[in-house]
Amino acid sequence: MADFLTSTHRAKWIFTPQDLKEKYKAANHRAKQMLEKYGSTRVDVDLDGSLSYPELQTDPKDNGEKHSRSKPLKIDEEQLLRAFYEFKIQDVCDAFKFPRKIQATALIYFKRFYLQWSVMEHHPKDIMLTCIYTACKAEENHVSAEELGKGIDQDHQVILNNEMLVLQSLGFDLIVYSPYRSIDGFIDDMEDFIYSNNGQLQHLKDLHETAKMVADRMMRSEAPLLFSPGQLALAALRRSNEEHQVVDFERYLNNTLSRQHPARPVSELTVYLNAIDQLVNNLVTPTAADMKHIDRKLKYCRDPGSHEKSKKRKHRSKDGEFWCRKGMVVLVFAWSGYGHIFLLAVLGLNVIRQIGNWLVFIQQFERII
């Protein structure tokens, strides 16, 4: 049976907080340099799994204009975007009724991937789906890419295109350890501890279920990259026990360490559990509204041409006017630039004139009249 102590998870994928900061900073810096040099950060994945980088701009003037328009994401903005899609991973897994181990594995894959890459290089929406697909394979709960893509109305080919990229970014280290199995083990151990003390076995089920829900939230923090699954499990159980008051948790920790690690003081373990608690307390779940500005910046980084189109639309929207015909009547409207439309005149003409990009508004008014 696989063992965490001898695993690649422990050897290669447990970091210090400073390690994580340096990795996120390096990925963000590389994407910024790409934006400055090429005018775009988008790295496309071809059908054969190879990567296509932006082409170097030959016109210095054009290159400079693009640089001035597109602003790179800050490190904290990347963090918010990752947090948003980690929450989406849990949503998708819940929708497909996948077991918790698949959800946890997909989240760990996603976190590991973005230790190597910036969200400006590979869009997290695409990587999210591929991580779920890969986790299903690794945990032997196979679902086809077509089924996964269809279930959430996404192109399944994107999932397949990114599969080799994700595997390579993970170093092909696909066996991961989540806290849920450790939670189960500690609950079994607590049965004897509780029975010999106060007979509250009936309350263990509630403690168990709440601990798993706490672990769900914990998996969206940076804790899985910093602590072992056993430490995560104990932190989840301690937090759950604060609600249910099933055991004297400090006494249980002393009892457990005296049997398994007699030379290790409880105070040392408590420091780790407190740090995990702090990460969970600081966890932010961004909403779609929170992501609007960041998503727009990301779009401009990956597709600078969209910025120019947006500016043109915005420019035309100021002080514009358009005519809308209904039968033999033409209604003349003006756009204030502040979200208001004013009816200027009604003309008996059988012509239509459109000034600016107002087709959508014309269609709307034709339906109203």
Image (cartoon, rainbow, N blue to C red):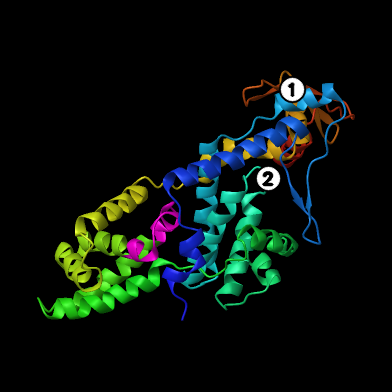
Task: Give the residue at the far right of this rendering.
Answer: 351
Q: Residue at x 61, y 42 (%)?
A: 27
Whether the residues at callouts 1 and 2 have beta carbons within 8 Å, the answer is: no
Is residue 222 found left or right of 135 in the rendered image? left
Can I make out residue 189 in this image? yes
- The x and y percentages for residue 341 are 67, 25
Crowd around label 1: few <14 · some 14–19 · many ≥20 (10 Å) = few
**Which residue is tagged 1?**
315
Q: Is 218 a magenta residue? A: yes
Q: Residue at x 28, y 73 (%)?
A: 186
Q: Mark 1 vs mark 2: which is more N-terminal?
A: 2
Q: Dot 1 lies on which element? A: helix
**Could you tell me which quadrant the C terminus lies in?**
top right
At label 2, which amino acid type do we have? Glu
Q: Which residue is more in the foreground, 255 or 96?
A: 255
**Which residue is tagged 2?**
121
Determine the image quadrant of residue 350. top right
- The x and y percentages for residue 24 are 54, 43
- The x and y percentages for residue 239 are 26, 59
The chief SS type of the magenta part is helix
Disc 1/disc 2 C-alpha distance (Å)? 29 Å
Q: Where 205 falls versus 292 (above or below)?
A: below
Q: Residue at x 24, y 77 (%)?
A: 189
Question: Which of the labelled discs sits on residue 43, or is there none?
Answer: none
Q: Where 134 falls versus 54 (above or below)?
A: below
- The x and y percentages for residue 349 are 88, 26
Q: Residue at x 71, y 70 (%)?
A: 146
The span shown in magenta is 216-233
Q: Nearer the viewer, mark 1 or mark 2?
A: 2
At label 1, which amino acid type do we have? His
Q: Which residue is more in the foreground, 354 or 352?
A: 354
Crowd around label 2: few <14 · some 14–19 · many ≥20 (10 Å) = many
